[in-house]
Image: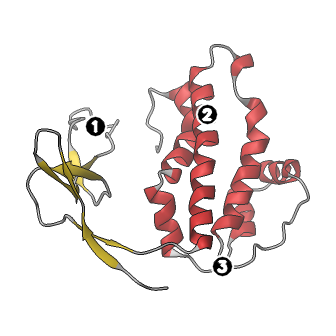
Amino acid sequence: RNAQMMVRIEYRTPDGRRLILTNVNDTKPRFRNFKDSSTPTTSRVEAPKSRIGFVEKSVGVGIFSMKPFSANESLLLDRVKGYIPSFKLYTHRYLSAKTEDDLPVDMCEPLVGLLLDLIDDLEPGEPAPRLHENVGEYCAQASSTNEAEFSALFNGGEACLEVQNLCVETKLLDALFEAAVAPYNRCHFSKPPFD
């Protein structure tokens, strides 16, 4: 069950070159400081990033530790990956809408339902019983209470690092963030989002 295997993955090109799959240590772009116009937009900050690619020369990080997924872990991975297209579609429809009538208002309640399902999937053990029967009641409560009171409904169990990493590695968190700021980016794209 806890077996692990260390591997180095190589690929031979048709012209005979040997390429080694490796972890590419890259940098993430720094947020632009909108208040200080002297901050170069190209400035970057070192940050760990899981990105892999093929290189011709070994750089010492080409060995990967692999472990088998259980059936439940495999199912969770498939479910997490399955959430991403809906959030990306919402973002795309929001940013590409030509008129108010084109905005993806029809997707809002279904996406809240997906978020509730996601919360259930990511909590260890059996999901807690839901407070409301339907998604509309959650939306109404979210609109009528402050953020702290509403978020207290979802304080869940212990954080699970493996599940958090899964959400990062599959780019689910990126898709959720883009969907969350899509209305802002459509209306206020010239202003800093975190002022």
Q: Which of marks 1 and 3 is in front?
A: 3
User: Which circle's residue, 2 or 1, is located before the other in the chain?
Assistant: 1
How packed mark 3 is, by other alpha carbons closer than 10 Å (few <14, some 14-19, many 20 or more), is few
SS for dot 1: loop
- What residue is at 65 percent from the left and 79 percent from the top? 157
SS for dot 3: loop
Q: Distance between the residues labelled 1 and 3?
A: 41 Å
- What residue is at 64 percent from the left and 40 percent from the top? 86
Along the line of sight, which residue is nearer the eye, 153 or 110?
110
**Residue extending farthest bottom:** 2
Whether 151 is drawn above or below 159: the answer is above
Q: Tags 2 and 1 in contact by the CB under 8 Å rule?
A: no
How packed mark 1 is, by other alpha carbons closer than 10 Å (few <14, some 14-19, many 20 or more), is few
Whether 116 is drawn above or below 175: the answer is below
| Residue underneath mark 1 | 36
Q: Where's residue 129, x and y in %?
A: 84, 71
Along the line of sight, which residue is nearer the eye, 182 or 68?
68
**Residue extending farthest left:** 57
| Residue underneath mark 3 | 157
User: Which circle's residue, 1 or 3, is located before the other in the chain?
Assistant: 1
Q: Tags 3 and 2 in contact by the CB under 8 Å rule?
A: no
Q: Distance between the residues labelled 3 and 2?
A: 30 Å
- What residue is at 48 percent from the left and 48 percent from the top? 174
| Residue underneath mark 2 | 89
Residue 22 occupies quadrant: bottom left
Q: Nearer the viewer, mark 2 or mark 1?
A: 2
